Image (cartoon, rainbow, N blue to C red):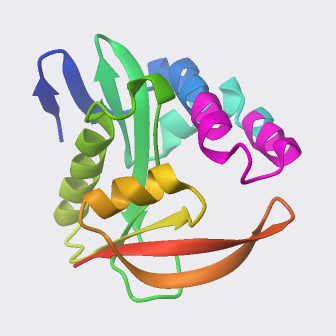
Amino acid sequence: MFVQAQNVLVRPATVADAAALKTVFKRSWLNAYAGILPQEYIDQMIARRDAAWWEHQCRTVRRMMVVDVGGKAVGYAIYGPYRGEFQAPGEIYELYVLPSHQGLGFGEHLFEACRHGLDMLHCDGLIVWALADNAGACGFYERRGGLVRYRRRESVGGRRLRKFGFFWD
């Protein structure tokens, strides 16, 4: 799906986006998870997703969308069939936007592009998991109409954290 409004384009990721996506991931994780996850864990995750990792993802992940503003990827989302144990046909696995571009509607463009993609896969529902302590992500999904249908505890970076499963029918 391609969505264009002014100089904003939501489109599939390409290898040319790899460096920008590495930056999006790094800045988003530093912003979203500081104080929630141990800094050492955040740093390890960022280091694992080096340039080669992102190039590989851009070549092989079929359902990765980017929001392109003026020719530069400022956010991305990855979606597909649900990978968990609950009944949910579709899932957004990751959705991140540069902190400098949050609150401007770019995340909503990505979210809707993923919903459209899941519709094309004939998914009649959607789940997104977010750490309960990540108020920004939880608020974003609540404003999109997601209902917390599932709650669980999970070990992330050596900490036992609550996760919410936001659901849309």
Q: Which residues are magenta?
A: 25-46
Instruction: Look at the image and say whether residue 27 sits in the magenta stretch.
Output: yes
Task: Tell me what residue is drawn at x 42 percent, y 32 percent.
Answer: 75
When the figure is inspected, residue 152 is found, relative to residue 116, above or below; the finding is below
Which residue in the rendered view is the most extreme toward the left?
5
User: Can you give x and y, in whole percent of width and height, for residue 115 in the image?
Assistant: 23, 58
Q: Is residue 26 magenta?
A: yes
Q: Quadrant of residue 107?
A: top left
Q: Quadrant of residue 65?
A: top left
Q: Who's the residue at 52% across and 20% down the image?
A: 20
**Residue 92 in picture, x, y percent from top left:** 40, 59
Q: Main secondary structure of the magenta part?
A: helix
Residue 69 visible, this orientation: yes
In which quadrant will I find the N terminus? top left
The image quadrant of residue 8 is top left
Q: Quadrant of the C terminus?
A: bottom left
